[in-house]
Image: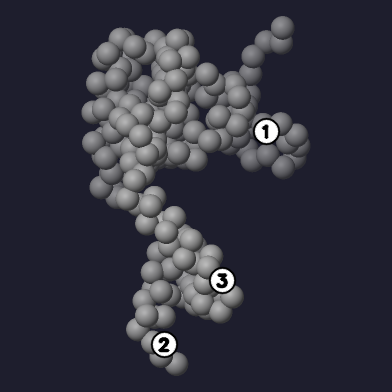
């Protein structure tokens, strides 16, 4: 069955969302058309406004509507000179939810992946270098993901920090809170043993 051009275009555009295939896009389109046109119009406006007005923070590259995000604009977050480097805005949200970190962030918006054409420039290394050279950063915490690409990215930035005489640390990894050893993979256990520390 062939849909009308407008319906067909709606289904096609919905497929740009992650994890949404043709059938799911069709269900979404008809749900909006049949039962929630008001919600669809609000969604359309929210998408339009976000695409028009959300940009990157001038300091950390996180998403914001202003020149500086709330964290970078907060002078209290500059006091300790600690910069946490993450791959995505979702990582910032995860760390902020812990209420443990009180410094600033630098969001790479990805990781090094030469096979995909993602090099240092694409993840903001020139901007990061400039920030590290400003003498406003005493320590860099590397909080990239524990994937092959995340580890390579952390290693690259660690070398950059060494060349600029900035201390670089890596977040710990190991057994999660509430985790049972029988269900933990060997690689995670190995890192947990390597990162063990003396009890106070």
Dot 3 falls on a residue whose secondary structure is loop
Residue beneath the point at 40% across and 64% down: 16
Q: Earlier in the sequence, mark 1 or mark 2?
A: 2
Residue 35: % across, % down: 59, 75
Q: Which residue is mark 3?
A: 36
Q: Is residue 19 above or below residue 155?
A: below
Q: Are marks 3 and 1 in contact (CB under 8 Å)?
A: no
Mark 2 or 3: the one toward you: 3
Disc assigned to residue 3: 2
Residue beneath the point at 42% across and 59% down: 45
Dot 1 falls on a residue whose secondary structure is loop
Mark 1 or 2: the one toward you: 2
Residue beneath the point at 44% across and 32% down: 86
Q: Earlier in the sequence, mark 3 or mark 1?
A: 3
Closest to the observer: 82 or 39? 39
For the N terminus, give its image quadrant: bottom left
Disc assigned to residue 53: none
Q: Is residue 164 above or below residue 49?
A: above
Tag 2: Cα neighbours inside 10 Å, few (<14), some, or many (≥20)? few
Q: Earlier in the sequence, mark 2 or mark 3?
A: 2
Disc assigned to residue 176: 1
Dot 2 falls on a residue whose secondary structure is loop
Direction bottom: furthest residue? 1
> For the residues marked 1 and 2, what is the alpha-carbon distance in whole angstroms?
49 Å
Using residue 186 as the reference point, say whether residue 76 is left or right of it. Answer: left
**Number of numbered tags placed on the structure image:** 3
Instruction: Name the quadrant containing residue 177.
Output: top right
Q: Is residue 109 above or below residue 98?
A: below
For the C terminus, give its image quadrant: top right
Direction front: furthest residue? 38
């Amino acid at each position: 069955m062939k849909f009308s051009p407008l319906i067909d275009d709606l289904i096609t555009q919905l497929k740009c969302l992650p994890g949404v295939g043709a059938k799911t896009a069709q269900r979404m389109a008809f749900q909006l058309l049949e039962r929630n046109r008001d919600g669809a119009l609000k969604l359309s406006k929210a998408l339009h406004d976000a695409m028009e007005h959300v940009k990157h923070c001038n300091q950390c590259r996180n998403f914001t509507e202003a020149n500086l995000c709330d964290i970078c604009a907060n002078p209290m977050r500059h006091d300790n000179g600690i910069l946490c480097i993450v791959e995505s805005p979702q990582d910032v949200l995860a760390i902020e939810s812990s209420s443990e970190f009180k410094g600033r962030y630098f969001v790479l918006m990805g990781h090094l992946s030469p096979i995909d054409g993602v090099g240092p420039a694409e993840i903001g290394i020139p901007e990061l270098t400039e920030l590290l050279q400003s003498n406003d950063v005493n320590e860099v915490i590397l909080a990239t993901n524990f994937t092959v690409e995340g580890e390579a990215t952390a290693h690259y930035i660690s070398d950059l920090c060494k060349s600029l005489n900035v201390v670089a640390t890596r977040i710990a990894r190991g057994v999660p809170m509430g985790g049972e050893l029988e269900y933990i993979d060997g690689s995670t256990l190995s890192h947990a043993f390597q990162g063990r520390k003396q009890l106070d």
